[in-house]
Structure formats: structure tokens, C-alpha cells
Image (tube, coloured by chain):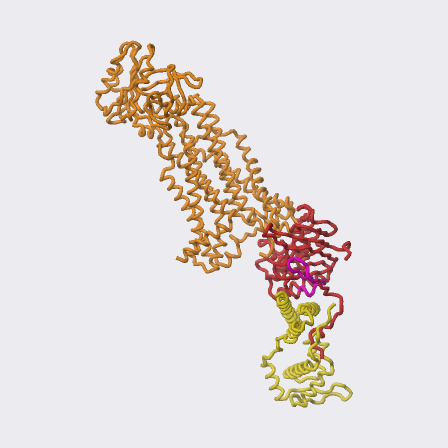
Chain colours: A yellow, B red, C orange
Amino acid sequence: MAEAAELPDRESLQGYQLRVVREVLLALLAGEASHGYQLRARLALALGPLAGALNDGQVYVTLNRLEKAGLVTSERVGQADKPDRRVYELTPAGRHQVTEWLDDTSWPKPAPAEFHLKLVAAAAAGLADPVGIVDRQRRALLGGLGQAQRAALAEPSGSVAAILLEGVVLRLQADLRWLEACARHWNAAKEG
Amino acid sequence: MDGNDSVLSARGLRKDYGSGSGLVHAVRDVSLDLSEGEAVAIVGPSGCGKSTLLYLLGGLERPTAGTLQLAGRRLEQMPEAGLARLRRHALGFVFQAFHLVDELTALENVELPALLAGASPRKARERATALLEQVGLEDRLQHLPSALSGGERQRVAIARALANGPEVVLADEPTGNLDSAATTEVLRLFDRLHNDGQTLVVVTHDERIAATADRLITMRDGAFVDETKLTGGRARSLTEITGLDA
Amino acid sequence: MGRLLITWRLAIRDIERRRVQSALLLVMIVTTTTTLTIGLALHKVTDSPFARTRAATRGPDIVAQIIPPPSTQHGATRGFAPLIHAPGVAAVGGPYPIAFARLTTNGINVEAQAEGRDPGPAAIDQPALTAGRWISPGGVVIERGFADALGLHVGDAVHLNGRALRVVGIAVSTAQCFYPVSTPGVIWLTRRDAESLATRTQPIGYVLNLKLADPNSASAFENGNAATAFGNVTTNETETFLSSWQDTEQSDFKVVSVDQKVLLIVSTLLALLAIASIAVVVGSRMAEQTRRVGLLKAVGGTPLLVAAVLLAENLLLALAAAAVGVTLGQLVAPALTNLGNGLLGSPPTPPITASSAATVIVVAILVAACATIVPAIRGARTSTIRALNDPAHPPRRRPWLIALSARLPVPMLLAVRLVARRIRRSLLTAASITIAVTMVVAALTLEHNDQVRRQVSVIGTTTVAGRVTHLVFLLSAILIVLAALNAIFTTWATVIDAQRPTALAKALGATPGQITAGLATSQLAPGLLAACLGIPLGLALYQVAGGHVSEASPPVLWLLAVIPGTLIAVAVLTAIPARIGAGRSAADVLRSE
């Protein structure tokens, strides 16, 4: 069985992830003030099977940072012996941030530059057969697609998580199609 | 691979068309063993011969050479009548163009194979009703194909393919004529069939269907060029695949 | 100009694409146009061959003969005086010497009447040659009925009273009835040759031809004063004979009328059934043209362009067929119109006149036009999408038939559902087979009529009856061939239409045997209907065409045999294309369309 695909750089990913969690929490608070655990639950619901990516601490850390940035305020409520005592609320600055985020149309960059360059380098330096690299990657993605698809099917259709998983599936499918095109291209380059 | 417990077993299958300078080798020396409950997806560029291979496996075309064994019977020498009888009980077909009979309702379409196999009308109808319920079309029984969406039509076709409890279901580009939503419907159905233990061979362009198979075979120019086992091996977490974990 | 080119190209391309079908269609239409041509030619034959021959030979209104007793040598022709100077006589031909001589040939020994003539054409009664040339010294011309009876052809040797002579020609004339209506048979030769045949016991007689100012008064003349005076010329056992052309015609007619009736019946049958066949063929073709109309519209064709393409295609086929049909008819018709009796079946010019050729071509054009109008109009009214998606009309759904068929064994299930999905086509098939059965029944009636006639023959000789029998046989054969072609065409079209459902049935587990049986059975229902309708229709048609069913109705057993005969024929004719079609792999049909 082929190896799993290499993960992108952790740090950059972490930055993106943190940003996403930050905006989502702000948006969720725009509706009503909530406890931290409520926010965490709603996030988990929206992510479905992918909720495992979110560790518990992340939500509270983010809320803390948001408060420091002046985008939310918190208030202590409830008994002293309950661990979760704070209720969070949006500030006007936070509300403005939410509006901006909702109007923002930026999208993760589609160019698969890294893999493309990997193939170019392999071919140029004669280190490995690009077609072989493509095939291995294909197999890896196929495995991933299979799992994602099965997970998508397991979700009740129409659920919030289902649509997320469909997004995963379709993007993997798109990637696979590109890989097929790569195979054709590098095959032709070999013969030509 | 031990062929004895295979549901379907092919050795050295060849199919040629035309003659002389127009000779085309549609299928070249293909060997395949299909275990019970296995789902095999066959992919490849257009014209690579995957549809031809499927029709060979189903006895709808005669191979130029090679042997084919299904449910313990040798197919390549069998007379047409014998093949037809075998098709009744051992094979179910799903076509890209659905090929439902336009003037029959969904129910009448699904009961057709049973009637052709000589079942009583009542039994055939009962089974057809049950199958249509199974595929989620219990409120479309009396609809004509023209009143059904693409996905619904293909689901009727799948129900029809299951009418006589076939050993193997052969599907030729089942989602070729469907949009994304309908493809998901059909995909869901195939997945369920697979989980219920139905042996499947699906020729497809769609990566989603291919990815949910047990085995993925790539064909080019009439021959198998790659074979990948998709199940077994390390199961990665979903979050790992989608890269959401931090 | 560009549009014309496109129209032309589309039409040609379409014909090329469906080569087999176009060829089959062409054969069908050719057969029917040929039959139509022959029918028209024969119809001409049946009107007044006597009058035609009389006009062609400048036949006499009155013929008078004097046969002097052995002793008389000269002056016999003086007996013609009352006739020659009679009032109302416009012209005189002759007198010509006639000798009664013994003709020997081919082992036959028979009496003949040898008439001496001039080498140049006579003003009255110049026999019309149907073969060879006119008389010369030692060269004789024989009357056609006589020649046929004796089996003589141009170039044969004959002996008259022992004298060797050669047949140089064969001709017809209305001066006397043809052999064997009038005996002895007539031979023309030079005056000298005729006179040399005189014997002591059989002296030379004389014949005189008269043309009257008013030909219709010939009967009156025959009974008038001049004739009486001529009759009184009898002296010393001189014999005189006088006859008008009406007498001759009537005697001839008794024979000819029978032939004429036969020909009239057959020609009418042929023409009617030919037109009906074309209508059925065209009707079945119209159904599939609707889809092509949709295609043309979809690629941007205006209704006019669409109609033009269809018309071009249909015209091309129809005109080609008409041309071939007229040509074939021209080749075949003379063999049929040569009745072999002593009259001209037709003018010496080719039997296919410009008018009959024109008729055939006009019929062809009309058929092409009708074949175009209906699908063009239907196509213009139907939305393009529907025309494209539903070939012809979408199959109709008949729930009770579907429910019924579920209880039947597999071949019958297939048969009922095949019929149910295209009721209109099944009716068309029934119509076509009905026409075929009608033809067969009419042919049977004709054949039976001929048999009866042969037994109760008016003439009692084999020659004339034999030729007519051949005619009947030939024409019945044509009818049956047309019927078979008709049936093959329709069953073929049905098999092609049933390709998809039968391929599907094959994939779902129906054996080839079941499918063939199903297809054949699906034709049996229209076949049975056709047989039941065709029998009375065939008899009625025979009656309409001029025959008398009561006098020549075939035995009931024959008629009843038509029913199982039709069913068997339909089953076989369907099984053949069905079997051929079953050979084509179902995979081809079912593959992504």
C-alpha cells in the first residue's frame, strides 16, 4: 500500500487553522453570547467526522486571544466550582471583523505548485520517473478519496457535515483528474 | 490466485474486430479473478476496451480467444440459449443509457427479468416491489421512466439488475449520463450493495465510484496496465487526509 | 445555390447511410412500377385489338370470294361486277387469285388457302407483318394464328402441293378470321406462285376486297341488293361467299373476348395492387422520417429546407424506381402482349407509349410528394426535442395488454408487448399482408378460372388456350412475388424497429429461440387478421376487375388453405430476418448510444 501523502508544513497550516477558528467563533458569537463549551459543541457539529481535528484547548486559547485583541468580551457567570464560567460576547470591532470575513471572497490557492515542481525537478535531474511519482500519488489520493467518500455516505444526506465531506470528495476528485492529466503529459514527454 | 473460489474467472480473454488492415484488438489477453463480495472498478481512457471487456464477461459478446468461467460454468463455448439462461440467474446488467422500457412503469420494468425467467406474475411483482423499496423508490412504483429523474431511472435499472438475485452485477458507466447529485444517489446504492455482499464489476470514468471499490484496475489499449488494492492497508484518519489536524 | 447543394448532399448522404434499407425500398418500388407499367400496357391491349389491326392493315369492309367449278378457267372474275359497281363502294382491292392447296411441314399435312398478292403494298388489306418481310418469288407469308398452330417460323421450309417454298414472313389481317376461327389457314404468296398451285380438282378462285364510303353500312350492304345480285352469279356450281367486317370481328371476338377478359382482370389487379403496395411501403417509411426531420431542424434547418431534403430523397428514389420500372416493363410487356392470336396485341410500335410512361412517372412523383408532405408537416408541428427523442411516435402504453402478457409464456409475452408498443405499425403490417393475401387469392381465382376454361375450351385447340394459360401463370407469379416482397419488407421493418427491445430482452435472459418465436408470433396476429380479410377482398377484387366469381370461384378448400398458408408464410418470413438480426450482438445495440 502506498505511503500517505506528505502533509503541508505544520506551521503555516496551523496559522490558517487558527485563523479559521477565530473567524468562526466571532461569527457564531454574532448571533448570541455563548459559553465556551457551547461554541465548541457547535463547531464540532459543523465539522462532523472532521471534528477530531479540533482539540479542546484550541477553542479556549483562541477565545483568549480574541479577547486580548478586543474583538470579544467575557463575563464571569455561574458558580465558582464549575470549570467553565465565562460567557463571551462580540464587541463592535468584532462585529465589524465578522462582516468583513463574511464578505471576503478569498479562496485557498488552487495551484498545486509544489507537486508540479516535484515532477519537473525529478525529470530534469533524472532522479526518478515522473510518471512513477504520479502513479504513487494517485494511489494515495485514491485511498483518501475512498475513505472520504465512505465517510460522506455515512452522514445523513443534507446534514451540515455531509456537505463538507462532499467538498472533500470533489476536490480530491479534481486532484485525481489533474494527476491523470499529469500522467498523460509526462508519458508523452517520455516518448517524445 | 486460486481460481476455485472465484465467482468469475477469466483467462487470456481476447476480442478482435474487423480483419486485415482494419483489425482492431479491443481486448488483449485479459485475465481476471473475482472473489465473492468483491467490488472491482475498471477505469481507463475512452476506447481502451473496458466496455467490451464487460460485455465479454457478461456473455453478451463472444471472445475471440480465452476462457471464461462464471458460477462454475464455462462460457466461451456455451450456445446462445445457454448463455441467456445463465444471464437470468447469474448476472445483472446496468447500462449507461439505462435501457428501461419506455412504456412500462418502474414496477413493470423491474419485474421483467423475473417474468423472462418464468416466475409467476405475482411473485415477480412482489419481488419487484421489494427491490424498489430497497432502492428507495417505493413512491415511484407506477411512474413511467419519462417521469423519473436520471438518478431515479438508474436506480430502477439497478433494481432490475438485482431482480433474479445475480451472482455478479456488471455496470457499464452507470453514472455516465448523470449529474453530480444523481451520481451520489447511485454511488450510495452501489456502496450499500457492496456492503451487503454483492459482487460488482463497474466500468467507470468517475473517480468517486472507482475509489470505493476493493480493487481498481486500469486498462489501456485493451490490456490491464495497473491493479491497485484499495481496501486493506493502513486506514488513515479522515482528518489526516483532509489536513485539518493541527 | 448553396442551399440546393446542402439539400442534395443531405439527401444523398442519408440514402447512403441506410444502404440496405434504401436498396430494399428501391426494389419494392421498382417491382411495383414495373407491374404498374405492365398493367397499363396490358390494359391497352384489351381495347379493340380488332379495330387496331383493321386500321393497321387498312382492312376491307366487305370481302367477297368466288370459287369456280373445276372446269372454268377464265372470266370468273366477271362475277364480281355487281359488287364493283354497287352504290356505296369507295374502293376495290384485287381480285386476287386464291388456291386451296395441301400444305406439308413438320410432318403435318393440312389444307391451306394460298392467296396471290403483289409485292408492293395493297391499298386495301395489306397484311401487317409481325415477323420477317413480305412475299417474294418462292417466299410465302403465313397468317399468324396459322403459323403458331403449325409451329412455323421465318426461314422454315414448307411444301404446298409438293412445291417447296420458304416462309419469309408472318402477318395478321382482318380480311378473314384468324386461324383456327376460320379454316383453312391463310398464306400469302406471289400471284405466279399461287396460280401455279391450281390443280384439276381445285381450280383458282378469286377474292375481292371492298371499302365502303360508310364502313358502318357493311352489314346492310351484306344483305343488300348488290350482295344478292352477287349471290345469283352462281352458275355451274360456282360458289360465292360474302362477309362484312362486323361478321369477322364478332367471330374473332368470341375468342379474343376471353383473353381480353383475362388480361383486363389481371391488368387492373396489377395496377391497383401496385399502387396499394407503394402506399404501404411509403407509409411505413414516413414513421422514421419524423426523427430525421427533428435532426435537421436541430442543426438549423428551416421547415422549407427540411421539406426540400425529404422531397429530394423521396423523389430520387421514386424517379429512379420509375425509370427502371418503365424500362423493365418495356422489356417484359411485349412477351405478354403478344397474344399469339391473329390480331395485333398492340400497334407495331413499342407497347409502352409515352402516355403510360408518363402515367407511371406521375404516379411516382405523387407518391414521393405524399411521402414528403406528411412527415414534413408532422415534423414542423412537433417540437424538435420531441422529434429527436421519440423515434416516430413514442410507443403507447396499454396497461391491460401489459398485465395480460405477464401471464403468458415468454415468447407470447414478447409478442404481445411488441405489438402493443406499436399498434399503428402492426396495423400497417396487417394491411400489407392483407394486400399480399388479396393478391394470392386473386391469383388463385385466376388460375382456377384458367383451369376451368381450359377444360371447357371454346376453341378446342391447344395453342391459343396454351398461350393464355402461360400468361395467367406468369402474371400470377408476378402477383405472388410482389406479395412476398411486400411481406418481407414489412417484416424486415418490424424486426429493425424491435431491435432495441429484443436486445434488451436478450441481455435480461431471453434465449434467441424465445426472441425469434416472439417476433414471429407478433406478426401472426396481423397475419391472421390479414388472411381473414384478404380472402373476401381477393374475390371481390377479382369481381371488380371484371371477372365473375360465381363462375370461377376457387374451391372452398383452396380458400381455407390460404389461412394457415398465410400464417406459415408470415412466421417464416419473420423468422428469417429475426434470426439474422439475432446474430447481431446485443452488445452493439445496447452500447452507449
**Residue for point 75% across, 66% down:** B232
- Assess whether residue B224 is covered by the magenta stretch: yes
- Assess whether residue B166 is covered by the magenta stretch: no
Q: Height in image: C235 above or below B67?
A: above
Q: How many marks?
A: 0
Left or right for A111, reference C95: right
Tell me which corner region of the image, top left, top right, bottom left or bottom right, holds residue C161: top left
- Using the rendered image of the protein, determine whether residue A9 is visible from the camera's viewpoint: yes
Q: Which quadrant holds the N terminus of chain B?
A: bottom right
Residue nearest the viewer, comparing B43 with A63 = B43
Tell me which corner region of the image, top left, top right, bottom left or bottom right, holds residue B177: bottom right
* Position in image of residue C431 (x %, y %): 50, 42
Residue nearest the viewer, comparing C464 with B116 = C464
* Position in image of residue C262 (x %, y %): 43, 30
* Position in image of residue C537 (x %, y %): 48, 37
Q: Height in image: C117 above or below A16?
A: above
- Using the rendered image of the protein, determine whether residue A154 is visible from the camera's viewpoint: no
Q: Which quadrant holds the C terminus of chain B?
A: bottom right
* Position in image of residue C227 (x %, y %): 26, 18
Left or right for C416, reference B167: left
**Residue for point 37% across, 24% down:** C168
Residue nearest the viewer, comparing B180 with C334 = C334
Region rendered in magenta:
B209-226
**Residue for point 56% across, 50% down:** C421
Tell me which corner region of the image, top left, top right, bottom left or bottom right, holds residue A146: bottom right
